[in-house]
Every structure is written in C-alpha cells, then in structure tokens.
Image: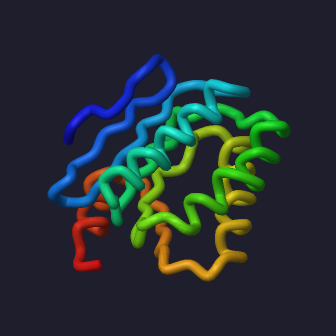
Amino acid sequence: MQLYFQNNFVRLSYDKTLRLGMAEWNGRLHGSELREAYLLCLEMINRFSLTRWLADDRMMGTIAPADLKWSLEVHVPRMAHSSLLRLARIPSQYENNREAVELMINKGYTYDLNLVLRDFIDKREAMAWLMEEV
C-alpha cells in the first residue's frame, strides 16, 4: 500500500494495481478537518479509479451534527457516484459514530448504487472479501 495522506486523525493509502483504498481513522475530527479528510478520500478514489475500499473506523470518534449534515449533503452523494464497487467497514467502538455512519449508509442506499457494503470485525476477513472477484 502506498501512503496518500496522513495526519494525527487519518491515514489514507492505496494500491493502484488492486484498485484498493484504505482509510484508517483515529480520534474525533470535526469541521474542516473531517471535510478535508472525506474530500481526500474521494480525490484518491477518483484519481486511481479505485473499486475497493476498507474503512477502518474502529478508533473514529463522534461526528458532530453539522459535519453529519454536510456528509449527507455532499460526501455521500459523491461516494455513491464514485467508481467503488465494494466497501468493507470495521465499525467504530463509539456508539455515536456508528449511529452517524448508519445514517450516511442509509442515505447512500437512496441512490442507484453498484456498491456492495459489508461490516467486519476482523481486518483480514475484510481484506479477503474485498479481494474477491468484483
């Protein structure tokens, strides 16, 4: 995996050959930090025509209401229309985050999606599923 971006809150990496991207979240991002991280995810997906994505949300903190609203209006529609075909997610340990992400997922399903989403507990299982034929 090649590092695309990293700060104290998120590490974004990709494998161009496998068309795989990964976001590993850490802590609570809010406002411009969260929005920048989400936009960088989309930029990486589009730049490399990624079809597989692993969202490791285990350490991702609460998403503020204003950021959730922005995510539902801006981020989710863009993700829904991206090249992604499979998204594996390891949910956050924080209940508030899981609830916010569920809202985003439900909003995503209102679009005509080719994206298949599945939650995992184990990162190896998530990667194995992502690597199955798309």
Closest to the observer: 76 or 124?
Answer: 76
The residue sitting at the left extreme is 17
Task: Tell me if 1 is positioned left or right of 52 in this view.
Answer: left
* Residue at x 26%, y 54% (from the top left corner): 124
Task: Tell me if 7 is positioned left or right of 112 in this view.
Answer: left
Give the quadrant of residue 113: bottom right
> x, y percentage for residue 104?
69, 58
Total label count? 0
Q: Please state, as top left, top right, bottom left or bottom right, where the C terminus lies in the image.
A: bottom left
Q: Please state, as top left, top right, bottom left or bottom right, where the N terminus lies in the image.
A: top left
The residue sitting at the top extreme is 8
Task: Tell me if 32 is positioned left or right of 114 in this view.
Answer: right
> x, y percentage for residue 81?
55, 68
Closest to the observer: 63 or 92?
Answer: 63
Closest to the observer: 49 or 113?
Answer: 49
Give the quadrant of residue 68: top right
Q: How is the image coloured?
A: rainbow
* Residue at x 75%, y 54% (from the top left corner): 72
Classify 91 as above or below 104. Answer: above
> x, y percentage for residue 49?
33, 60
Q: In this orientation, does residue 1 appear?
A: yes
The residue sitting at the front extreme is 47
* Residue at x 81%, y 47% (from the top left corner): 69
Q: In this orientation, does residue 28 appear?
A: no
Classify 54 as above or below 83. Answer: above
> x, y percentage for residue 86?
40, 69
* Residue at x 30%, y 53% (from the top left corner): 48
Classify 32 as above or below 37. Answer: above
